[in-house]
Image (cartoon, helix red, strand yellow):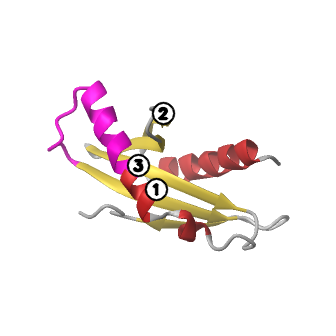
Amino acid sequence: MNKQALGQRGEVLACDYLRSTGHHIVCTNYRTRRGEIDIIAIKDGVLTFVEVKYRTDLELGHPAEAITKSKLSKFRITVLEYLQQKEIPAFSDMKFDAITILEYPGQPPQLELFEHILGP
């Protein structure tokens, strides 16, 4: 699989997980010139912005290691742009999560949720 297909696989698994926990998927792959939000979901009135990292081995490290300060900074800026574009007040109920997925060939995916990656 190429990088784009791997990313799509991870996002499909993450969306399936979020739906199984009662989330409604609002948007996937929201892009601006400054960054991308992989998944935007809502549950119980709380808007959740989700970064997804997917790997099929540990050659490049655990997927969580790919969530860098630089990535979080771009993530934050992109969220602010989304809120502005959609005219959503910045004080609305929202949270910022990450889902990491490690899926070795022939084995079930190992999914881990990291909540509040930008603070509460």
Badge 3 crowding class, 10 Å Cα cut-off, few under 14, some 14 to 19, many 20 or more, is some
Q: Is residue 67 left or right of residue 8?
A: left
Residue at (75, 72) in percent of width and height: 59
Q: Is residue 108 magenta?
A: no
Q: Residue 71, which numbered label?
A: 1
Q: Is residue 120 above or below residue 88?
A: below
Question: Which residue is the site of mark 3?
Answer: 74
Which labelled disc corresponds to residue 31?
A: 2
Q: Nearer the viewer, residue 72 or 1?
A: 72
Q: Secondary structure at mark 2?
A: strand
The reply to whether callout 1 and callout 2 are in contact (CB within 8 Å) is: no
**Disc 1 to disc 2, C-alpha distance:** 14 Å
Tell me which label, 2 or 3, sits earlier in the chain.
2
Magenta span of residues: 74-93
Image x and y of residue 12, in percent: 63, 45
Query: In this picture, is 23 found above or below 100?
Result: above
Specify whether 113 is left or right of 4. Answer: left
What percent of the width, then of the height, locates residue 102?
A: 67, 67
